[in-house]
């Protein structure tokens, strides 16, 4: 079974982003970039499927600027077999990414696409569901446990009230949540080996996909600052202030 | 212009998230139609294949009836996030996720980078598919009930998926996303058993219990307790953070709370920077003392 793993290059989760003074966006120049943490979980899950003999080939795929090759090399170092970069300098929104991924799925015909539930930069939480819709495939979003057997994927999903289990006939799309697994680190020998693994580059035009953005970002601003930092000495003072000053308890 | 709101419900009552989504539509202007897709739910769309509210089936139904609507609106909850993008892609339109404000019928403000920036975005599509950050809009009051109820036919069930079961957390406490007071525990609680201490305090305050990602990852409490960027977004009147250091991913889920109390032994913990009332000390002494103080006076 072939598995496709879309991965996104994002500002590292430890970086405190700054809004550009002209309000055009967030400053990403000279900022540490990493693989979206939810996509790391997807790569790990795919690698485990291969280690169990369920998956035969893992194809990592990324959409964006040339530097996304680094993200793909990370995926290769973690265990992906080969990689595809859909290279463009254009701004890519989730619908465009889903269309690009569909074009690759049509060529590669994987049985499973597994990706992060959300990217930590735009926080959209859309791409996996959109891809499933375009393909007419079932989807299991926010996965916390995945079992694959007999052409079916049984997935435990994190829902607002707890957990839910669905069984899907493959091919299908799965999006990962935090508790699915704990991703491994790439070892140095694997990082070296990853440099020799195949990485193909294609352009959106070659796939016949129009990636023009549908949403225009008019401005980006800093959120209002919260005034905090107040301290109380003890429990008595806390309760008194919550009652008389904040008036949030009676 | 008319707006379709997709109701989140449990087949008998509307979830409060729906009331917040309807409130956002009030700012858009136009007629509001509510789609209740379910089974044995005296609603508009009624079919056995809608019982599990699987995205495949609910989205197909929405797409079927989308024709006349300018806006299709869902709450940005697990329910809405699962379904909305499927609808948007099927209609070949962008989705605007997690809106916090309606600037005009095509322009919205939404948080990006865990709420560390707010983007104003304009949709160029003829139809807008939107999910609404429920904490950003005050719930409408359900009253009147004069609207006409119309039945719509559900498309046949999607073949490739089946709901096998649900394990929902049972609790007599208020729901996290609609509670007036929330007490959240973090890694500082050290083990799941210690959440009992928070429960005693929550009983006094009729509060919901939440948790940081660290506490959920460590297995102290179930996943549905998680407050944060990728968990639940909450904005209660009072949020008491116990043993939570305050990673930006956690702050993203609770910093719009009206009043924030932080209890932590580390005076440098980032949570204190956004807390209205910080109390530095050992939570294992402070929490029982707080419960006792609330009982005695």
Image (cartoon, helix red, strand yellow):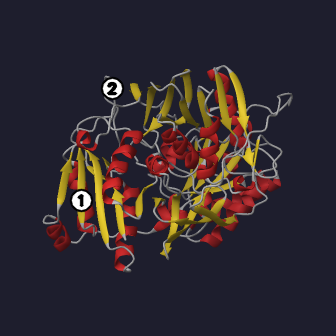
Residue found 36% across the figure and 31% down from its top = A213
* Extreme residue toward the bottom, this view: A52
Specify whether disc 1 shares its chain with disc 2.
yes
The chain to which mark 2 is attached is A
B167 in relation to B270, above or below: below
Left or right relative to B181: residue B124: left
The chain to which mark 1 is attached is A
Task: Give coordinates of residue A8: x percent, y percent.
Answer: 33, 50
Q: Nearer the viewer, mark 1 or mark 2?
A: 1
Q: Earlier in the sequence, mark 1 or mark 2?
A: 2
Residue under pointer 1:
A83
- Give the quadrant of residue A193: bottom left
* Residue A96 in view (yes/no): yes
* B157, B278: nearer the viewer: B157
Residue found 62% across the figure and 39% down from its top = B64
Which quarter of the rendering shows the C terminus of chain A? top right
Left or right relative to A121: residue A159: right
Circle 1 SS class: strand
* Extreme residue toward the front, this view: B156
Residue under pointer 2:
A24
A112 in relation to B230, above or below: below
Circle 2 SS class: loop
Left or right relative to B135: residue B47: right
Q: Residues within 10 Å of mark 1 (few under 14, many from 20)?
A: many
* B113, A142: nearer the viewer: A142
User: Real-space Cα distance between discs 1 and 2?
Assistant: 32 Å
Residue found 67% across the figure and 51% down from its top = B176
């Amino acid at each position: 079974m072939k598995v496709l793993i879309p991965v996104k290059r994002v500002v590292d989760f430890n970086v405190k982003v700054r809004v550009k003074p002209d309000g055009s966006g967030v400053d990403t120049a000279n900022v540490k970039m990493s693989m979206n943490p939810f996509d790391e979980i997807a790569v790990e899950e795919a690698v485990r499927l291969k280690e169990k003999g369920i998956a035969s080939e893992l194809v990592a795929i990324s959409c964006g600027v040339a530097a996304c090759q680094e993200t793909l090399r990370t995926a290769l170092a973690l265990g992906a077999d080969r990689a595809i970069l859909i290279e463009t300098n254009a701004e890519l929104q989730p619908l465009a990414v889903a269309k690009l991924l569909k074009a690759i799925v049509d060529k590669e015909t994987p049985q499973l696409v597994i990706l992060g539930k959300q990217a930590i930069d735009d926080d959209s939480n859309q791409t996996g569901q959109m891809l499933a819709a375009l393909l007419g495939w079932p989807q299991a979003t926010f996965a916390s446990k995945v079992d694959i057997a007999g052409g079916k994927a049984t997935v435990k999903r994190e829902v607002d009230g707890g957990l839910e289990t669905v069984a899907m006939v493959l091919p299908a799309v799965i999006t990962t949540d935090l508790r699915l697994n704990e991703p491994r680190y790439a070892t140095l020998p694997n990082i070296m080996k990853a440099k020799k693994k195949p990485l193909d580059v294609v352009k959106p035009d070659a796939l016949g996909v129009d990636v023009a953005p549908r949403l225009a970002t008019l401005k980006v601003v800093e959120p209002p600052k919260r005034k905090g930092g107040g301290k109380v000495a003890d429990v008595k003072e806390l309760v008194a202030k919550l009652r008389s000053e904040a008036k949030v308890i009676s | 212009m008319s707006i379709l709101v997709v109701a989140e419900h449990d087949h008998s009552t509307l979830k409060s998230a729906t009331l917040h989504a309807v409130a956002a539509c009030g700012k858009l202007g136009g007629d509001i139609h509510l789609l209740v897709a379910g089974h044995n739910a005296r609603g508009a769309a009624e079919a056995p294949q809608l019982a599990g509210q699987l995205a495949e089936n609910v989205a197909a139904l929405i797409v079927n009836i989308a024709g006349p609507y300018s806006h299709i609106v869902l709450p940005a909850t697990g329910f809405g996030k699962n379904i909305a993008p499927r609808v948007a892609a099927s209609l070949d339109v962008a989705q605007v996720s997690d809106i916090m404000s309606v600037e005009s019928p095509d322009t919205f403000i939404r948080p990006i980078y865990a709420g560390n920036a707010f983007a104003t975005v304009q949709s160029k599509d003829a139809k807008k598919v939107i999910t609404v950050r429920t904490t950003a809009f005050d719930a409408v009051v359900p009253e009147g009930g004069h609207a006409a109820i119309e039945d719509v036919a559900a498309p046949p069930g999607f073949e490739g998926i089946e709901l096998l079961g649900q394990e929902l957390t049972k609790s007599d406490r208020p729901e996290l996303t609609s509670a007036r007071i929330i007490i959240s525990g973090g890694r500082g609680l050290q083990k799941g058993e210690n959440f009992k201490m928070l429960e005693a305090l929550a009983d006094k305050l009729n509060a919901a219990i939440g948790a940081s990602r660290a506490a959920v990852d460590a297995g102290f409490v179930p996943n549905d307790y998680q407050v944060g960027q990728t968990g639940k977004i909450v904005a209660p009147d009072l949020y008491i953070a116990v043993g939570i250091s305050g990673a930006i991913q956690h702050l993203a889920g609770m910093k719009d709370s009206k009043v924030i109390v932080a209890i932590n032994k580390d005076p440098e913990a980032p949570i204190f920077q956004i807390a209205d009332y910080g109390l530095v000390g050992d939570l294992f002494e402070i929490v029982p003392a707080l419960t006792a103080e609330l009982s005695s006076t």
